[in-house]
């Protein structure tokens, strides 16, 4: 059954693909992100009657409050929250990493996510809605340079489990979706290098934003009595990394 979804981080990649997928199925979608021009482009593409854009930085609580308070009546009853906004910055090992980048990841991937979730819980409970949190395989499998990014996604996975427990009896469904390699702007933003992005995804046949959008739509389309707790996805070409060994002498 169609309803109203709020999708954070919808200016590109999984968020934008999800907006398109849900609108195609008859949903109304609220899209958020920092790049207002891209949100406006989604409205132009999908229709102002189907898409409402609110531009803010996930780290700015007052901006979130203002945006949610200003939702028009036909978008105010939210049935689904997709917490997609997040980022990875830097690939250096912890001892060489930029502390400001660590803080930005924590503030966006954790603090921003829990803030908007907390503020929407009354509406979601009233509607017996659903929450889908975008975690990552990095929450489970460490890799060199993943440090704080992996830590933030481990939080998202555990927070999802905690929400599921706390919301017991409310009818609200909670799912953690944990993708591996997906070709989006993710690596370009992380490294600032198109060449690095091309090298990572080249000849790897990675998952696409559309693949993940289909997964999110499938989760949201399950009957109200069925909760999908967690989904982990990887492209066939990606598997688990081996252990590292430092040789002595």
Image (spheres, rainbow, N blue to C red):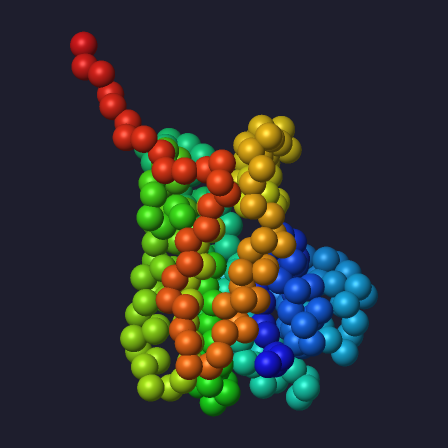
The quadrant of the image that shows the N terminus is bottom right
Q: Position of residue 141 (x, y in %)?
A: 34, 43
The vertical placement of 152 against 131, above or below, is above
Look at the image and tell me whether residue 186 can be seen.
Answer: no
Q: Residue at x 34, y 73 (%)?
A: 164
Q: Position of residue 234 (x, y in %)?
A: 47, 46
The vertical placement of 31 against 93, above or below, is below
Q: Residue at x 50, y 87 (%)?
A: 127
Q: Residue furthest left?
A: 249
Q: Residue furthest right?
A: 44
Q: Residue at x 77, y 61 (%)?
A: 41
Q: Nearer the viewer, residue 8 or 20?
A: 20
Q: Position of residue 178 (x, y in %)?
A: 43, 54
Look at the image and tell me whether residue 20 can be seen.
Answer: yes
120 on left or right of 37: left
Residue 91 image-quadrant placement: top left
Q: Nearer the viewer, residue 105 or 18?
A: 18
Residue 249 image-quadrant placement: top left
Q: Nearer the viewer, residue 12 or 62?
A: 12
176 on left or right of 33: left
Q: Residue furthest top?
A: 249
Q: Position of residue 174 (x, y in %)?
A: 41, 72
How many marks do you count on the picture?
0
Q: Residue at x 39, y 62 (%)?
A: 230
């Amino acid at each position: 059954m169609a309803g109203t979804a709020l999708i954070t981080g919808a200016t590109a990649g999984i968020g934008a693909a999800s907006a398109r997928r849900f609108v195609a199925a008859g949903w109304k979608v609220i899209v958020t992100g920092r790049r207002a021009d891209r949100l406006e482009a989604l409205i132009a593409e999908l229709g102002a009657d189907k898409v409402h854009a609110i531009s803010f930085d996930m780290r700015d609580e007052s901006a979130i409050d203002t945006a949610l308070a200003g939702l028009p009546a036909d978008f105010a009853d939210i049935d689904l929250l997709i917490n997609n906004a997040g980022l990875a910055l830097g690939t250096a090992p912890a001892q060489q990493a930029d502390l400001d980048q660590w803080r930005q990841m924590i503030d966006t991937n954790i603090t921003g996510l829990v803030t908007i979730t907390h503020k929407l819980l009354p509406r979601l409970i009233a509607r017996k809605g659903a929450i889908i949190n975008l975690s990552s395989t990095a929450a489970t499998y460490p890799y060199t340079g993943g440090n704080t990014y992996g830590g933030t996604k481990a939080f998202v996975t555990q927070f999802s489990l905690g929400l599921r427990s706390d919301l017991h009896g409310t009818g609200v469904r909670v799912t953690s979706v944990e993708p591996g390699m997906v070709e989006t702007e993710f690596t370009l933003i992380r490294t600032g290098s198109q060449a690095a992005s091309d090298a990572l995804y080249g000849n790897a046949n990675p998952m696409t934003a559309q693949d993940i959008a289909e997964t999110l739509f499938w989760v949201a389309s399950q009957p109200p009595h069925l909760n999908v707790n967690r989904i982990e996805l990887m492209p066939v070409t990606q598997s688990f990394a081996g252990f590292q060994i430092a040789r002595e002498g």
